[in-house]
Amino acid sequence: MSFALVLLVAALLVATVGPLALDSVCRSTNRPAVALVAWLSGVGAVPVFVVAAMTMLLWPEHPPIEQAVDAVLGCLSAFHHGSGPWLADSMAILVALGATAALARATMCSHRHGVIVRRVRRHHRDTLSVVAHRGGEDDVMRLEHPVPLAYAVAGRPGFVVLTDGLCAMLTDHERAAVLAHERAHLRGHHHRIAACCEVLASALPFVPLFVRAPAAVRTLLELLADQDAARATSPAAVRSALSTVTTAGTPPGPPWSLGGGVDTALRLTRLATPTPSRPSGLVCLSAAMAMLALPALAATGVVAVSSVSTCLLLS
């Protein structure tokens, strides 16, 4: 049971303290891809720790790693063995019931969210097929409307919507930067990433990490698309286009599109700094592993302190 307790404490730490640590990482790095991997790994770490803990509790015999943990947490282990099997069985039942309820609610919210988004997006596509026309490129739909607006519509195939109002106020380089930005959203499946975070936030609103994830991930997706557009065109073109669009008071796109509510000042500030190269897979993997290893180590420390306290109380 000792190792399962460590895993559950790790899940609790990620779910509660994780947002503060991840926000600090986002502020300190100009690599949104690494920060995004860290956020998504943190979101994924919570169910991973819970499922691993449930597996340890339901294990028929003591798993091999339990002996190593018991050696570190001797007093806590002695308390567990002295209390009989009812304690581990009760914890296993509670964890299993909680995980099953969370999974059922997440599945229900995911289905509901998917049905609504698909229905609205299908209606939007049908409307655009009537009122818009190809903008000279296969993946661009041009809409005759004076309001400056640009957004990506995910799907098969995905495409970018540009209004005449936006094209009229941008230079060719700025227009290319806007297209590169929106195409980065489509290429990176950013809509799906944001949707997954929104589903978790609606399904489990009592988990601080899941509640904070949608806004943080959307911001990182915008920063990531900005950097991709800056590499495809130039940072100056992306910054100029963003400044022009912001000054014109461009309204947000459809509710399911990306970009709404993102801090424009932050985007402009990041674009004013040199654009870093794409992080290697090793760097991203290290960020993901850190979101598993660091909470596990911290949880071990917390449980170890609890073990010492148990020793003092029992002595």
Image: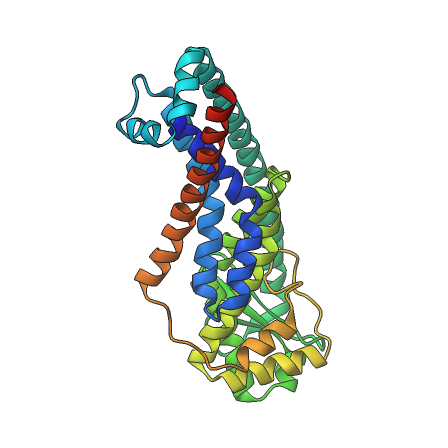
Q: Position of residue 256 (x, y in %)?
A: 61, 56
Question: Of residues 105 and 189, which is closer to you in this image?
Answer: 105
Image: 113 above or below 128: above
Q: Position of residue 297 (x, y in %)?
A: 40, 43
Question: Of residues 129 and 241, which is closer to you in this image?
Answer: 241
Question: Of residues 288 and 234, which is closer to you in this image?
Answer: 288
Question: Of residues 131 and 305, which is closer to you in this image?
Answer: 305
Is residue 145 toward the left or the right of residue 110 in the image? Answer: right
Image: 302 above or below 311: below
Residue at image location 51% in from the left, 80% down from the top: 177
Q: Quadrant of the N terminus?
A: top left
Q: Position of residue 42 (x, y in %)?
A: 47, 48
Q: Determine which quarter of the picture holds residue 153.
A: bottom right
Looking at this rendering, what residue extends furthest in the front direction? 315
Number of numbered callouts drawn: 0
Q: Position of residue 49 (x, y in %)?
A: 43, 36
Image: 95 above or below 163: above
Residue at image location 57% in from the left, 43% down from the top: 16
Residue at image location 52% in from the left, 47% down from the top: 196
**Is residue 162 in sight in this rendering?**
yes
**Is residue 50 in sight in this rendering?**
no
Looking at this rendering, what residue extends furthest in the left direction? 64
**How are the colours assigned in the image?**
rainbow
Q: Determine which quarter of the picture holds residue 304.
A: top left
Is residue 199 toward the left or the right of residue 165 in the image? Answer: left
